[in-house]
Image (spheres, helix red, strand yellow):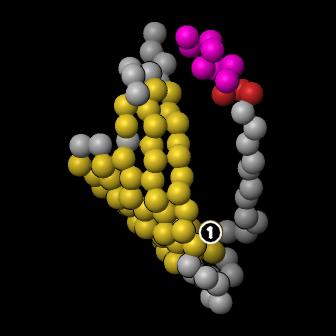
Amino acid sequence: MKAILILLLLLLSGTVSADEGFWVSNRIRVGYDRFFTSTQFKLSEELTHQFSFDAGALLKVNDMAYVEPRYVLKLPKLDEEIEHQIRLSFKFVFKH
């Protein structure tokens, strides 16, 4: 089963992006039981800032797999619109 999960993870394509320059970020995440909420503040080199809020749940599928659906609300930088996102994360824990 572990080999199948690892193979599936390697077959999934992904995109990676990075911002050039210096930036500072602060994230606070609190939760109770399987539900959580968090806020994040990011300040970049161009003196622009971004604030985001998200809420979700960490759902246990079995002893190895977790699914984390969450809603993210990003408040705009200067002259931009509010951004709404729905994210889905998969977490796998391998123990020997």
Point 23% across, 49% down: residue:
32
Identify the residue at horizontal 49%, vertical 19% (top origin). Answer: 94
Above or below — where is 17 with respect to 76?
A: above
Observer-nearest residue: 23 or 33? Answer: 33
Which quadrant of the figure has residue 47?
Answer: bottom right
Residue under label 1, please give it: 23
Check the picture and name the quadrant holding the N terminus.
top right
Locate residue 49 relative to residue 32 in the image: left or right.
Answer: right
- Neighbour class for label 1 at 10 Å: few (<14), some, many (≥20)? some
Q: Quadrant of residue 53?
A: bottom left
Whether residue 76 appears in this view of the structure is yes
> Magenta: predominant secondary structure element?
helix
Residue 4 on the magenta span: yes
Residue 50 on the magenta segment? no
Q: Which residues are magenta?
A: 1-8
Relative to 45, is 14 above or below?
A: above
Q: At numbered mark 1, what does the secondary structure look like: helix, strand or loop?
A: strand
